[in-house]
Amino acid sequence: MNIILFTILTLALIGTVSAVILYVTAQKFKVYEDPRIDTVLATLPAANCGGCGFAGCRNFAESLVKADDISLLFCPVGGNTVMAAVAQALGKSVEAKDPLVAVVRCGGSPEHRPRTSIYDGSSSCAIEHALYNGDTGCPYGCLGCGDCATACAFNALSIHPLTGLPVVNDANCTACGACVKACPRNIIELRRKDRKDRKIFVSCINRDKGGIAKKYCGTACIGCSKCVKVCTFDAIKIENNLAFIDAGKCKMCRKCPPECPTGAILEINFPLRKNIPSPEKEAAAEIPVS
């Protein structure tokens, strides 16, 4: 009887001491969490896409709470509406930002960029890019395996069955940047989303000289500078034999697309142009043929 009582008392003592040790340890190493984190987290879209630059929405919420200035932090999925709600919850101010959308800077469909070899490996752009230049002559163009579409969690990207190029659904695109990170050729870019989803951009990233680029692809930018000469807003620059249109400066005047001799400058979601001959064509038409 004494042995049983002694055993019970010993176990009770050990349990009490252990509980005290655990309590003291928990208090000493207790991590305080700001309750505002849960408040901010509730306003976020819970996409956990990483487009904000953080591992997930909770990490982003923690950074928003800790930051003195949240103007440099942005949730691309929720956009300005969500950021306004976050600012109100934290009692901070934030300015609205222009929405972004993904664009594919490659126009090398089969009629412009014929196949020179057959790729018979894993259907992955990353793997194909690591092995060789691709199954066309252009070492810069889209590989068409669909890594971007696989990475998109919002069903905003698909591979066109005829062109083999990614197609962006502007309505679904949240500008999370997952497709940009997934593309080993860096042909996908996030650009400002203008009204009516209109865009003007150079659909090429080939930095080779004009003759070589044109040999690879019929719709490649050849760096001829004709677009630069007609732009009155200083929105186009030529660097490394490649034209680039600054979306922040571009006023959508549409002067540059007709000047491009290869059709590398795309204008999307604009009304059809009227077939008005240029002054050069009119002058040429007036010259009598002897």
Image: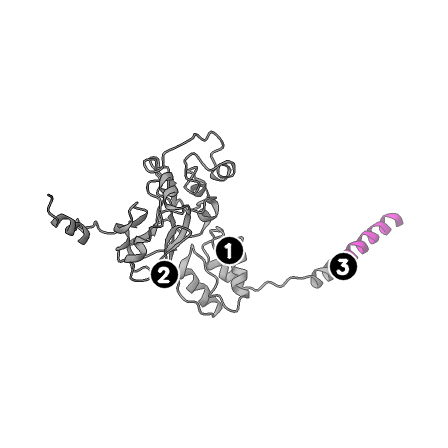
Please tell me whether mark 2 sits on a helix, a strand or a loop.
loop
Residue appearing at x 59%, y 62% in the figure: 33
Work out whether mark 2 precedes mark 3 in sequence or the reverse, and give the earlier one.
3
Give the residue number, with chain letter if any, for mark 3: 21
- The picture places residue 98, in percent across and down from the top left corner, at 37, 60
249 or 290: nearer the eye?
290
Please tell me whether mark 3 sits on a helix, a strand or a loop.
helix
Q: Residues within 10 Å of mark 1 (few under 14, many from 20)?
A: some
Tell me if 7 is positioned left or right of 258 in this view. right
Residue appearing at x 34%, y 52% in the figure: 201
How many numbered discs, if any? 3
Amino acid carrying label 3: it is: Ile
Which secondary structure is most common in the magenta stretch?
helix
Quarter of the rendering occupied by the C terminus: top left
Amino acid carrying label 1: it is: Gly
Q: Residues within 10 Å of mark 3 (few under 14, many from 20)?
A: few
Image depth: mark 1 or mark 2 in front:
2
How far apart, in angstroms, are the residues tagged by discs 1 and 3?
40 Å
Give the residue number, with chain letter if any, for mark 1: 53
Q: Residue furthest front?
A: 290
Give the residue number, with chain letter if any, for mark 2: 248
Amino acid carrying label 2: it is: Gly
Residue appearing at x 54%, y 61% in the figure: 62
Work out whether mark 1 precedes mark 2 in sequence or the reverse, and give the earlier one.
1
* Image quadrant assignment for residue 108: top left
